[in-house]
Amino acid sequence: GAGVSQSPSNKVTEKGKDVELRCDPISGHTALYWYRQSLGQGLEFLIYFQGNSAPDKSGLPSDRFSAERTGGSVSTLTIQRTQQEDSAVYLCASSLVFGFSGELFFGEGSRLTVL
Amino acid sequence: GENVEQHPSTLSVQEGDSAVIKCTYSDSASNYFPWYKQELGKGPQLIIDIRSNVGEKKDQRIAVTLNKTAKHFSLHITETQPEDSAVYFCARQGSGSARQLTFGSGTQLTVLP
């Protein structure tokens, strides 16, 4: 499709397990973002990638969270040793470039539930 | 800091009435202020934005106003319709190395038929 694609759409895991969430941005978009949306909360910035530059990881809540972007396209957000407080919807977005008042195009999110 | 305060958290209006959502920010270097609408089960979608050199912008039933001196901006929806029911997020973008969008906590708007 032409939009941002995220998978899985839903993930239920047990506490302590690792999870991987995938984001396929819009073709040609150089900037990619991960946000977290907890129940009834706003969008919490996690990390962004811009082209080949080093990612801004300033929003990652702990060292259990990591993300990579391969070939300037697909990104994977990995959460190790999941905790119940990690339960949230993880949203990925992309934009043509970073930081120039451009529209962010969001995917539909990956809903993570940690039991 | 870079926080954005958004009020109210929930808002119910009768169909045809107006709805207003307000946001305040603290970083005077903020220069771009978008509004996103999130329907149930969907990702947020941009509906309108305003830059710091403009005081007001309108697009059909939606308008946004910006008061840079007071550091607040508002979303106005007139003649509300049931399809306007959604969660609305304000956001701001800074400058320099802090140009990622910072979002407000969201407003659940319900338009009652």
Image (tube, coloured by chain):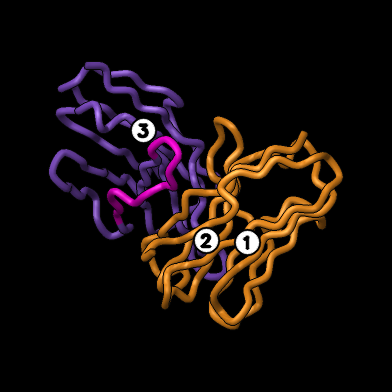
Chain colours: A orange, B purple
Percent coordinates x, y for residue A34 in the rendering: 58, 57
Q: Which residue is mark 1?
A: A47
Spatial separation of the CA atoms under disc 2 and disc 3: 24 Å
- Give the residue type that dot 2 points to: Gln
| The quadrant where residue B24 appears | top left
Count neighbours of disc 3 (C-alpha within 10 A) and say few if under 14, some if 14 to 19, many if 20 or more.
some
Query: Which residue is nearer to you in this view: B86 or A22?
Result: A22
Amino acid type, residue under disc 1 in the picture:
Ile
Instruction: Say which residue label 3 marks.
Output: B86
In this picture, which residue range is highlighted in magenta? B39-50
Quarter of the image containing the C terminus of chain A?
top right
Same subunit, tags 1 and 3: no
Q: Nearer the viewer, residue B46 or B3?
A: B46
In the image, which is nearer the foreground, mark 1 or mark 3?
Answer: 3
The answer to whether marks 2 and 1 sit on the same chain is no
Whether residue A106 appears in magenta in the rendering, the answer is: no
Q: Are marks 1 and 3 in contact (CB under 8 Å)?
A: no
Left or right: A4 as drawn, with respect to A114? left
- Distance (Cα) linking label 2 and label 1: 9 Å
* Residue picked out by circle 2: B100
In three-dimensional space, the C-alpha distance between marks 1 and 3, rounded to whole angstroms, equals: 26 Å
Q: Secondary structure at mark 3?
A: strand
Residue A97 visible to an observer of this rendering: yes
**x, y percentage for residue A8?**
60, 52
Number of residues whose C-alpha sits closer than 10 Å to that of mark 2, classed few (under 14), some (14–19) or many (20 or more): many
Tag nearer the camera, 2 or 1: 1
* The label number, if any, that marks residue B9 in the structure image: none
**Residue for point 26% across, 17% down:** B112
Where does residue A83 sit, x and y in percent of width and height? 80, 41
Q: Chain of mark 3?
A: B
Looking at the picture, do discs 2 and 3 lie on one chain?
yes
Among the 4 quarters of the image, the one containing residue B113: top left
